[in-house]
Structure formats: C-alpha cells, structure tokens
Image (tube, helix red, strand yellow):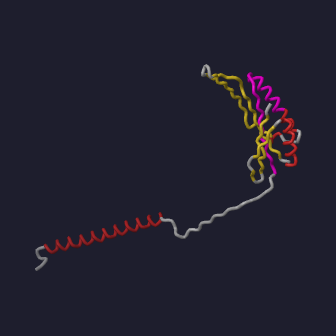
Amino acid sequence: MAGSNGTNGTYGKIIAWSHAALVWAGIIALVAVSYAACRWSRSLTYARTVTVSSEGKAVVKPDIATVSFSVVSEGANPTALQDDNNQKINDALALVKGFDIDTKDIQTSGYSLSPRYEYNPKTGRSSIDGYTLTQTVMVKIRDLDNAGKVLGQFGEFHIFILPKLLLPNYYEIITAKLFP
C-alpha cells in the first residue's frame, strides 16, 4: 500500500526534481568548463611557428664628400666680430662656389656668440674679457675629383682637416676649423 497515503508520491517527486537539478547543474558546469577551455586555448601561442631572420651587407664606392668647417673670430666688440666673421665665411664660401658646388649643397649648421671670461684671483670674481663668434658651414661635394682640390684650397685659409666616419655611398671627410 505504498503510495496510497501520498508520502511515496511526494518523495518520488523530490527525487525526480533533484535528479533534474543535478543534470542541469552538470550541463551548466560542462558548458562553463568548455567555454573556459576554449578561451584558454586561444590565449596559447601556436607551437608551429616559423621564424625567419637575415642579414645583408652592401659595399659601394663613396660618391659624396661632406666638408664641415667653422670660422672662429675673437674680440671685445660683438658687432665688429660679426663683420669680421662674415667676411671670413664669405671668402671661404666664394672659394667653395668656385668649384661649381650648387648652393643647395651649402648649409649653415651652427652659429654661436659666447662670452669669454677672465678670472681675477685677487677679487675672486670673473668678468667678461671678450667674445668668441663661431660660424659653422657644411658643404657636400658631389664631384669627388674636386674634393682634393677644395680641401687643398682650404689650406690657404688655415683650415685644419680631421677625418670622420666612413659610410656606404656617403663619405664624410672632414670637420675643420678656420682660425683668424
């Protein structure tokens, strides 16, 4: 007479609902684990990776010489220094242009006026004793046959030539200073 009073019926319903809840919980857990596994697998780098690296070297004959020179003037009057310095730089540029060097290949790369100080040990103070004006010009010489001739002419202006870095297809020959 089981089930006649309804206790087994209620108990059966509870069992059925708990089985259904367990099945749904299992399905939800399976979906959650699958989703997490998919996201995790997408974050991994692929084991089949191809890496390619290379190195190249080119050797070419230099075809441009770069000459950088400075005109330095010193004195007590900045205005007189500027006039003196401009005259010297114009003389040097006239020499350069005499070798058919295009104006676009001549560029001022620096211009500075700095005070020159003298220290007096008796007073313990420094005072301006004069000024130094430096004007720097960079010239590209595209005809390397003229490079030696231009550099030779600079010797008359007491330009001192210092070797610089060798670069493929671009030969930076000198940094020079022109002193009064």
- Which residue does the image show at 83% across and 47% down from the upper left? 142
User: What residue occupies the far front of the structure in this picture?
Assistant: 122
User: What residue occupies the far bottom of the structure in this picture?
Assistant: 1
Q: Is residue 73 magenta?
A: yes
Part of the protein shown in magenta: 63-90
Quadrant the N terminus occupies:
bottom left
Quadrant the C terminus occupies:
top right
The one nearer the camera, 96 or 116, is 116
**Residue 59 rendering spot, x and y as whole percentages:** 77, 58
- Which residue does the image show at 11% across and 76% down from the upper left? 4
**Residue 37 rendering spot, x and y as whole percentages:** 42, 67
**Residue 79 rendering spot, x and y as whole percentages:** 76, 23
Q: Quadrant of residue 138?
A: top right
- Which residue does the image show at 79% across and 29% down from the upper left? 85
Report the number of numbered marks: 0
**Residue 108 rendering spot, x and y as whole percentages:** 76, 36
Residue 86 vertical position relative to residue 64 in the rendered view, above or below: above
Q: Is residue 43 magenta?
A: no
Q: Quadrant of residue 99?
A: top right
Residue 112 vertical position relative to residue 49 in the rendered view, above or below: above
The one nearer the camera, 25 or 126, is 126
Q: Quadrant of residue 113?
A: top right
